Image: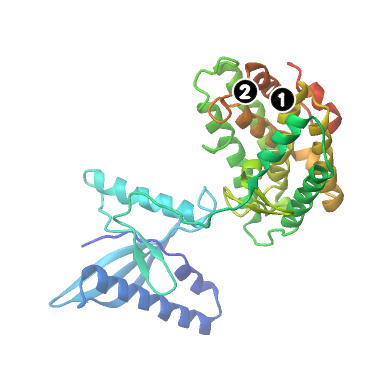
Amino acid sequence: MLYAVIAFERFERFERLHRASAIGLRMDFEKKVNLYLKERFGPGAKLTGMERRGKGTHGTGYLLTFTLPGEEQQVIMKSLSPSGFGHDHYSDRAQVLLLALSNYNEMEKHVKALDVVGDSQDRFISLRKAREFYIFMERAAGTDYFEDLDAVLEQGRLYRRDRERAQSLARFVAGVHQKKYAGQEAKALYRRRIRDLIGHGECIMGIIDAYNGADFTSDQELVGYAEKSLSWWGKIRNQAERLCEVHGDYHPGNIWFQGDDFILLDRARGTWGEPADDVSCLGANYIYYAIKDRDTFNGPFAELFHIFTETYVEETRDYRFFDVAPPFFAFRVLVIAHPKFYPHDGLEIKRRLLDFGLSVLEDDKFNMNRINDYMRAL
């Protein structure tokens, strides 16, 4: 008997639909299965049966029976459901199944995997030969927002356009955050986003693991940084009503201005998240530039920070932002202080940023009037 692990998402849903619609969806899905079997095993393959063989926490398995000239064969088709556990996005499920394709076949006495497929509009697409994945996109025109901030740093003052752009960026992201997640998976998705903030390879723990002996901090201090962050996971993980559409990496390098308009790049870590992630991402860069400019939080960049943040709060009336913001600010300054991402800054700047992160994690909420206090070592 042959066994295959192949990915699909739409078929499981047919059992939850109205019966007439379910029958049509199943027939459509069976056509895809039949076409895949012909492509995989030859034009003579024909699906003769699809039997459910159990449903577990992570997915559902089906026994497929099909005929080839002169013989009958069977394979197992297994799905992975978006049931939390880090399987919320289709890319998560693809990751798990691609890893299974490799791991199953490398272990002695383990059932073998034959393929992993993607479910497209009209057929299954085999991924078994894929070793890397690529994305093609349009080229962004214009100049990134870092150029604006560098110009302010050089000239030492703000112009009308600088203030207007900060307001525009605040109003834009406030509009994005108006779209709230209304599905039943909100609790799992919000918890995932908060958990990822602490433990994801691209977030606090992953960034800390990549510091690798930076001479302005120590491994012990960075572990303590993560421990302080972890306490915030317990505080804010159950606020699923805040789940909304987010950009996920709303920093100056991903904002490109074209005259009075702008375009965004590199949306990250999923569609839905905590709005404080976006606000802190850009806000932390204003704080960073204030440190570069004045070694303290005042001057033109402090003004930009207040314009951006206060405009955002005025637009959204989201005063709870201040209650959940500390670990997000701590994450963002940890990135900016990282030697790999910003290698040309002096140790004093990096130390100020790290002190800011450690101190803001100690407060019970983010207080805009205490930013200079946050920069002082505990």
| Residue furthest left in the image | 70
Which residue is the site of mark 2? Answer: 345
- From the viewer's perspective, tell me whether residue 188 is left or right of residue 24: right
Hey, what amino acid is under mark 1? Lys
Residue 66 image point, x, y percent: 25, 74
Is residue 329 visible to the viewer in this orientation of the structure? Answer: yes
Question: What residue is at 25 percent from the left and 53 percent from the top?
Answer: 112
Of 335 and 158, the residue lying toward us: 158
- Check contact, mark 2 vs mark 1: CB within 8 A: yes
- From the viewer's perspective, tell me whether residue 16 is left or right of residue 283: left
Of 110 and 375, the residue lying toward us: 375
| Residue furthest front in the image | 155
Hey, what amino acid is under mark 2? Asp
Question: What residue is at 31 percent from the left and 75 percent from the top?
Answer: 35
Label 2 secondary element: loop
Question: What residue is at 36 percent from the left and 49 percent from the top?
Answer: 132
Up the image or down, 76 lies above or below 199; here it is below
Sequence order check, earlier mark of 2 and 1 = 1
Up the image or down, 6 lies above or below 16; here it is above
Residue 21 image point, x, y percent: 52, 82
Which residue is the site of mark 1? Answer: 292
